[in-house]
Amino acid sequence: MTLLIKEHRCDAFYVRINNDLTINEKRQMMAAVKKQWKVQKTLYPSLSDSKLKLLLIKEHMAQVMYFGKWQDKWLYHPFPNMGEPEKALCYLTDVHGYDEDHKAWLYNKASLHAIDRFFMQVRRRLSLLERPVATSSSSGRKWHGYAAYNPAMIIKLLDIFRTFYNFVEIGKDKETPAMRLGLAKGKVSMDDIVGYIP
């Protein structure tokens, strides 16, 4: 990973969102974001949407806030969305000397979307990790209908699923995550994975 960072092939961010907001609070937030966007479009009518977004992110880059023992620099994203309300970002690998435009687009790309998608698929495809069920008569207790008797089985299942997700399953771009990172030249078949002998 260190080599990828030095070669400018990898950038890492902390991403923080507020998961405690209700749906109505999220809608109010989005209404405020849209209102602010209209104001900015009025102030900069000659800029395209992408250039205006870049400009506003750069303005936020000049107003980062410092937190914690290590004085991490956090930027509040000017355009959060319903899935990532009150999004804030901390650029962990800010060592490249990128120009301000490139850094702004990196801030814009940082997201928890890929992580959320992975967890969603884990929940849907691995019954041992489905969400617990509560019934009206359970007094707040949760029931894990398919819970594993041996927790070690969950670790094994996650290893298998992670391999499948990264090397076998292709996205809309016809590539697997491993292909996007340059770790594989093409989709790997399940037979090759299961039958692999080191």
Image (cartoon, rainbow, N blue to C red):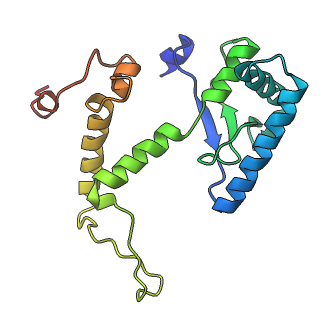
Up the image or down, 87 lies above or below 25; here it is: above
Q: Nearer the viewer, residue 160 or 114?
A: 114
Residue shown at 83% from the left, 39% from the top: 36
Q: Quadrant of residue 40?
A: top right
In the image, taking residue 135 as reference, residue 56 lies left or right, namely right
Q: Quadrant of residue 37?
A: top right
Name the residue located 69 percent from the left edge and 54 percent from the top edge.
Answer: 27
Q: How many marks?
A: 0
Foreground: 62 or 95? 62
The residue positioned farthest toward the right in the image shown: 43
Quarter assignment of residue 150: bottom left
In this image, 95 relative to 131: left or right? right
Quarter the C terminus occupies: top left
Q: Position of residue 175 (x, y in %)?
A: 34, 23
What residue lies at 41% left-to-right and 49% top-to-bottom? 120
Residue 67 visible in the picture: no
